[in-house]
């Protein structure tokens, strides 16, 4: 639990205490409609206005002060950011085990800091290095020559193939494979000849990779996921891709080999960036979109091939009118044909 006053300081919010004062203890977070006494909630979307007045929450984060309410108010210009900070304080990451299980295998030529937690059935190969305060869950494989930076967490069945480098305070969720071979083959009449994948993957500091993601090693040099980037589930990153810092990548997105995207890249689900395509910084792709040519101007895009979002909306409105336009064109043609007969 934490007092309202302390919570307000953590969030950087201005506090309007209710009847119970700034010392009121907050024990949890809940939506407006289900919150009870001792809970903190937040109001960031007008569609939830109907729940605001009758909420039983002890405190609510709001963008602007509300009149005629009984709960305490924490006023913040970005309620979603404020609730995220509150949740990080109230619900810190906890692990069920600390120490190094005797059922974990650590190669004699690996270096594992004494503060690292190794759950049972972790396998760390020769030349690997795990820095202090990391946590490796059951089934994690760390291949030869890999590096895992301070404070990183690898959840069950993560795989780091040879030479992979993970930065500080990274989070890799279950089942993700980092550093598997890139998809490199030369088609011939006799069959497909494999191109050896001789590079590695570098995942920088404060990156989070969701469950069941794959990041391929480079054919040569490096595949890079830069600082602060976050992946949803089932993201695929091809060989030699370079993803700019602080990017947000939703589920089932794919990056073709040698693609490069700038910082602040955001893409909705089931989108793609084609092989060897360059995308500048601060570009947002809508769902099911595909960048198949270079994008040189920041902004919001949609569709395949891509259009600026405002242009795409106009195109969709025009498409809806096509059946009617076809009928009108047919009538015009019939009128024209009749007129030509008369002449």
Image (spheres, helix red, strand yellow):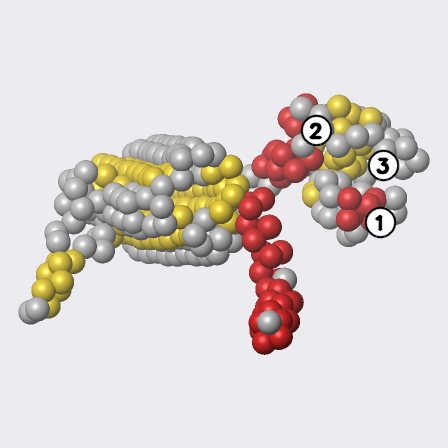
Q: Dot 2: few (<14), some (14–19), or many (≥20) neighbours within 10 Å? A: some
Question: Residue at left 83%, top 49%?
Answer: 51
The residue most toward the front is 343
Residue receiving disc 1? 50
Q: Is residue 208 visible?
A: yes
Are dots 1 and 2 in contact, CB under 8 Å?
A: no
Question: Residue at left 65%, top 38%?
Answer: 80
Which label sits in the foreground, 3 or 1?
Answer: 1
Which label sits in the foreground, 3 or 2?
Answer: 2
Q: Position of residue 278 (x, y in %)?
A: 34, 39
Occupied quadrant, residue 28: top right
Occupied quadrant, residue 45: top right
Q: Can residue 39 be seen in this view?
A: no
Q: Where is residue 97 in the image (x, y as percent from the top left)?
A: 44, 47
Question: Residue at left 89%, top 37%?
Answer: 69
Residue 50 vertical placement versus 111 (above, below): below
Residue receiving disc 3? 71
Q: Decide which of tag 3 and tag 2 comes sooner along the chain.
A: 3
Residue 263 vertical placement versus 201 (above, below): above
Q: Position of residue 255 (x, y in %)?
A: 35, 49
Residue receiving disc 2? 77
- State the CA–CA distance, disc 3 to disc 1: 15 Å
SS type, badge 2: loop
- State the CA–CA distance, disc 3 to disc 2: 19 Å
- State the CA–CA distance, disc 1 to disc 2: 21 Å
């Amino acid at each position: 639990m934490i007092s309202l006053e302390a919570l307000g300081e953590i969030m950087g919010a201005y506090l309007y205490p209710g009847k119970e004062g700034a010392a009121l203890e907050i024990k949890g977070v809940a939506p407006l409609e289900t919150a009870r006494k001792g809970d903190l909630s937040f109001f960031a979307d007008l569609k939830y206005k109907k729940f605001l007045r009758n909420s039983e929450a002890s405190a609510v984060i709001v963008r602007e002060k509300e009149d005629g309410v009984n709960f305490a108010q924490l006023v913040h210009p970005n309620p979603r950011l404020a609730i995220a900070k509150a949740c990080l304080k109230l619900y810190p990451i906890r692990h069920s085990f600390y120490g190094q299980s005797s059922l974990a295998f650590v190669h004699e030529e690996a270096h594992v800091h004494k503060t690292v937690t190794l759950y049972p059935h972790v396998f760390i190969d020769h030349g690997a290095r795990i820095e202090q305060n990391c946590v490796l869950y059951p089934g994690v494989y760390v291949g030869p020559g890999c590096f895992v930076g301070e404070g990183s967490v690898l959840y069950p069945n993560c795989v780091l193939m040879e030479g992979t480098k993970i930065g500080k305070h990274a989070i890799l969720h279950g089942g993700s494979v980092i550093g598997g071979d890139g998809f490199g083959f030369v088609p011939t009449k006799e069959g497909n000849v494999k191109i050896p994948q001789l590079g590695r993957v570098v995942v920088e500091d404060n990156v989070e990779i969701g469950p069941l993601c794959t990041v391929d090693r480079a054919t040569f040099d490096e595949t890079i996921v830069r600082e602060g980037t976050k992946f949803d589930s089932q993201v695929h990153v091809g060989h030699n891709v370079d993803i700019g810092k602080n990017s947000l990548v939703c589920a089932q997105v794919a990056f073709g080999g040698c693609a490069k995207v700038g910082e602040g890249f955001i893409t909705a689900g089931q989108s793609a960036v084609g092989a060897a395509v360059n995308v500048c910084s601060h570009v947002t792709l809508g769902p099911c979109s595909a960048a198949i040519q270079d994008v040189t101007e920041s902004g919001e895009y949609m569709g395949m091939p891509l259009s600026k979002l405002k242009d795409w909306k106009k195109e969709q409105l025009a498409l809806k009118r096509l059946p009617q336009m076809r009928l009108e064109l047919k009538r015009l043609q019939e009128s024209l044909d009749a007129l030509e007969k008369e002449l």
